[in-house]
Amino acid sequence: MTATLLSYDDVLAQFDPALGLEVHVELNTATKMFCGCPTVFGAEPNTQTCPTCLGLPGSMPVVNAKAVESAIRIGLALNCQIAEWCRFARKNYFYPDMPKNFQTSQYDEPIAFDGYTEVEVDGELYRVGIERAHMEEDTGKSTHIGTTGRIHGADYSLVDYNRAGIPLIEIVTKPVLGTGAKAPEVARAYVAQLRELLLGLGVSDVRMEQGSLRCDVNLSLAPKGADRLGIRTETKNVNSLRSVERATRYEMQRHAAVLAEGGKVLQETRHWHEDTGITTSGREKSDAEDYRYFPEPDLVPVAPSRDWVEQLRAELPEPPHEKRARLQAEWGFSDLEMRDTAGAGALGLVAETIAAGASPQTARKWWLGELARRANESEIDLGSLGVAPADVARVQSLVDEGTLNDKLARQVFDGLLDGEGTPDEIVAARGLAIVSDEGALSAAVDHAIAAHPDVADKIRDGKVAAAGALIGAVMKEMRGQADANRVRELILEKLG
Amino acid sequence: MPETSEHAGGPASDHPTISRDEVAHLADLARIDLSEAELDHLAPQLNVILESIASIQGVASADVPPTSHPLPLTNVYRDDVERPGLTAAEALSGAPEEEQQRFKVPRILGYDQ
Ligand SMILES: [Zn+2]
């Protein structure tokens, strides 16, 4: 089922992409959207339910005030209008992941609408319009039992309703045009920024790997210069930042191959496969899909007072974009340094390391150098590495005091990653401190000079640059535990 | 966006009827065990309800907005505070079948989420 792809350059020569992103965010409220059931991730199956979220007869939903507040704050942070009056609606469908046979959502009256956010890619700003952000509830979790483990060919399914009813906000962009070759990166940057924004608002855990932030990528291509949109596909399960970029690029190349041969793109949902990096065909989708929406009679309309909205607006945290500009100025980072730091998801870590006493440049150096390398090796996020910003600041202060050099500092990070304790404990236990015993150092320098008479002669002749070879030899004998500058001084004293 | 369907019952007719067989079928779908006597009793009652709805639909015209809520109430909320719910055993007590502490449901066709 491998699709034909057009080369990326050919895609761009012939077509303009239009992006659309639908992001579902699970709120981090203590209880569900319409009932008082807890929302703990990973609880034993069906231990967080009640008659309301199981849709039992006679039960009545009541809206969680905190969820409405979070929805409004998200809307405001995305520069949206907040509805003066809106209703919930029943989205009727007949799959067992909702025991009620409908999902309570909002239809044509979203709580927030008509906003925008600006994302930066390679120094250029792209404005992403927000069509709407509406409130709804999550569905239960199905496990398909059968030979394939997927829905097709399953013999039966098992359903856990712990997740059914957890508050969700669905954020839908307007079509994003004019991104050209940068479409995949703009898609990624938008989701990354949305993640940062939601984290700043404190309304969600935004853990993509746990499904508390889920992304669908809509994509269509139109012939270059055409004034209407092409037929779009909706790619589901795109649940990492990297995948958002890859899936967008893949669909661009797949659509282009179909269109270039005079074919027609099928309007359908596609499934993204993280392991193989491709999409496969899902359900055919028509715009006229009829969920028989109607206003939820059991929930009264939500009419947030303007006073409340204005109060929430006044309390919003600094927008990510402005925060980044402020930090860049405070830290004195170049554009490139800032972009790399943000791209590595290290802004918070660097900020905390600086707060713990490190200089901005040393904080950046460790996180984006040594620690990024180790995170890459283990294929995990920097934040999951298990090294605390305070530890990084302490390692740097040990370097500044002359107790450690960079090479020894790297060994302290080995110890931190192996859980050997605090930086000071590791230095003591591993015996890593720089030897300041001048006698031992002087002896090591004498050994090096004796072992490399030719190099020593060059230095005596004034070729100071040759000292590097002797410094290396001394550091080797001292097992790295020497201050290289002091070694250089000693060599030049002895041979000067 | 699909056109919302506020009148989910379809076009009104002057003589809506629901047969005894249809009531039996609905009861079966809803897992409600109805006796023969109850079917005899309920089918005519449901017909009365359908007739009442039909007469209301006859009055409604395009310039009358559909009523979703009879009372002018807004903003009824609860605090984000946990309330005791059901144990897994209680939750599953109404399930026709269960396995691994989960509701066991038949194979789902054409469902891809
Ligand atoms: Zn519940």
Image: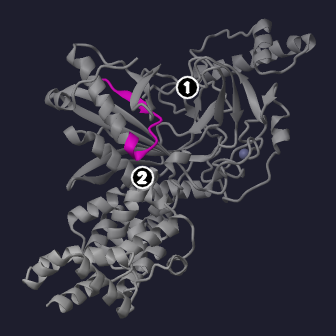
Q: Which of the two marks, 2 or 1, is nearer to us in this view?
A: 2
Q: Tell me whether marks 2 and 1 sit on the same chain.
A: yes
* Identity of the residue furthest to the left in this view: A461
Q: Which chain letter matches label 2?
A: A
Left or right of residue A252: residue A40: right
Q: Which chain letter matches label 1?
A: A
Left or right of residue A199: residue A333: left
Viewer can see residue A122: yes
| Quadrant in the picture for residue A493 | bottom left
Judged from the image, the secondary structure of the residue bearing numbered disc 2 is helix
Question: Residue at point 57% right, 70% down?
Answer: A420
| Residue A292, disc | 1
Which image quarter has ligand 1?
top right
Q: Amino acid at mark 2?
A: Glu
Percent x, y for residue A108?
A: 46, 37
Question: Residue at point 37% right, 54% down?
Answer: A193
Q: Is residue A235 magenta?
A: yes
- Determine whether the beta carbon of the residue marked 1 sits less than 8 angstroms from the nearest atom of ligand 1: no
| Residue A377, disc | 2
Q: Which residues are magenta?
A: A231-243
Q: Amino acid at mark 1?
A: Arg
Viewer can see residue A346: no
Judged from the image, the secondary structure of the residue bearing numbered disc 1 is loop
B88 or A411: nearer the viewer: A411
